[in-house]
Amino acid sequence: MVTAAVENGGSDMVIDGNEQKPKKSVSDGFDANYLKIYYGKLFPYADFFKWMSYGNDGKHPGSDQSYFGRREFSFTLDNDIYLRFQSFNNLSEMEISIKEQCPFKIDIGPVYSVDPAKRHAYAGDNVFTPVERELVFDIDMTDYDDVRYCCSGADVCLDCWPLMTAAIKVIDTTLRDDFGFNHILWVFSGRRGVHCWVCDGKARRLSNEQRAAIAEYFHLYQGNENSRKKISLTGPVLHPFLARSYTEVLKDSFESQLLCRQKIFSTEERYEKILDMIPDESITSDLRGRWQDNRRSSKNDVNSLRWEQLKNLLQSGKHKAQGMRRHVEEIVFSFTYPRLDLEVTKHMNHLLKAPFCVHPKTGRICVPIDPEHCDEFDPTTVPTVAQLLEELNAADMEVDSETDWDRTSLGESIRFFRSAFLRPLLKSCKEEIESSYNAKVQQSKNSLSW
Ligand SMILES: [Zn+2]
């Protein structure tokens, strides 16, 4: 049986539905009391600590024992109380603090040159400065509101989620193939987006300038609110990165998912938005003529039909020579290309919400997403904290508490985090510590023998 002390209400609440039913239904997802139990029994502290230590928690003489303690964590408490520059010397300090504070949100900041909690001691000396930080990406569905018609703002559904899936595929492939990064963690933000953590040593040590250069690599020109075109693809051929993104991800995402799910050509207002992207008057009036004469006799979906008509016209005959097919690509890019919050990527000291947090509005856990199976990820079925506690209640509680999570649907996420991300990451961290230690030893030997 799982019980939670109700801080403001006074009495104990039992979350199993038999004795004293919680006022909210489980699907409502979030309750501060649920959070206490979540942090008490389910949050994967040890895995989290291992990740954030990057191999520096071992006994190897080359490991940096101060590493974890120089990391900034930030807690958002109930009533929007915001605690920045929290730091912990070890796993148990972190665990005790999180359990005590019960933060609604935990953010991760950079590793500083000195313990961030003691930064005031170094004030004025310019000693306190960020030295390492994962390369991070933040993609938020609200940035896609002009290309999704199913929902807007904070809402997401399975008809617009393919936009996030396309972003994961494009960015993940590019980070691995073009930049050579290997240790990449994708995380559901809990409601309407995804976060990406690139954790390779060489990614963590990038300067702000280098981060900005990577962000710019992903950045496509986008017009302002009023401009007709959101994206302009210039030059005789597409950059190889854009060409690959188009043929491997975006074209298919547009044609087999978004076109029909978002009903992109279904109304005059919607198709006019697309015709606006084609600068040739004769083509647009031709298409407009066919679409206004709207007898829906065809068995085919009107969106697929109109898209085929548009493509045929732009890619065939006399228009082919005029480079009109580029506009087909521009339309696809406008509707599907990842929209990044570049500022988050560019600056080392930008905070980003930690994986395995509970989203305070939805109650959903910020679980990792497997980029190789991101098509299968369904944001509407990600477990909520309430659901996990119900599963805990249903499970046998007599087994040792270390693996409580394994008896809930959080188990799958933690096992994936360990096997696909943490284990290979720590292996390469160990190798890196080993080789830089050996290099140092060799160096000092050389200077001695001289
Ligand atoms: Zn939607």
Image: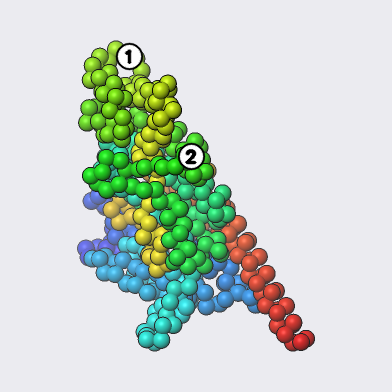
Classify residue 129 by image quadrant.
bottom left
Q: Nearer the viewer, residue 319 or 38?
A: 319
Q: Tag 2: residue type?
A: Val
Secondary structure under the numbered disc 1 in the rendered image: loop
Classify residue 82 by image quadrant.
bottom left
The residue sitting at 26% across, 23% down in the picture is 285
Residue 119 drawn at (x, y percent)? 39, 82
Q: Tag 1: residue type?
A: Ser
Q: Nearer the viewer, residue 103 or 218?
A: 218
Residue 349 drawn at (x, y percent)? 40, 68
Report if residue 253 is visible in the image: no
Residue 10 drawn at (x, y percent)? 23, 65
> Does mark 1 have its CB less than 8 Å from ligand 1?
no
Q: Is residue 410 above or below residue 52?
A: above
Q: Residue furthest right?
A: 449
Q: Disc number at residue 391?
A: none
How far apart marks 1 and 2 lie (CA) works out to 36 Å
Q: Quadrant of the N terminus?
A: bottom left
Report if residue 144 is visible in the image: yes
Give neighbour class at mark 1: few <14, some 14-19, many 20+ (Cα, 10 Å).
few
Q: Nearer the viewer, residue 241 or 299?
A: 241
Q: Disc number at residue 237?
A: 2
The residue sitting at 60% across, 74% down in the picture is 63
The residue sitting at 33% across, 47% down in the picture is 222
Give neighbour class at mark 2: few <14, some 14-19, many 20+ (Cα, 10 Å).
few
The residue sitting at 70% across, 74% down in the picture is 438
On screen, residue 189 versus residue 400, left or right, reads: left
Q: Determine which residue is flagged by label 1.
A: 298
Q: How many marks?
A: 2
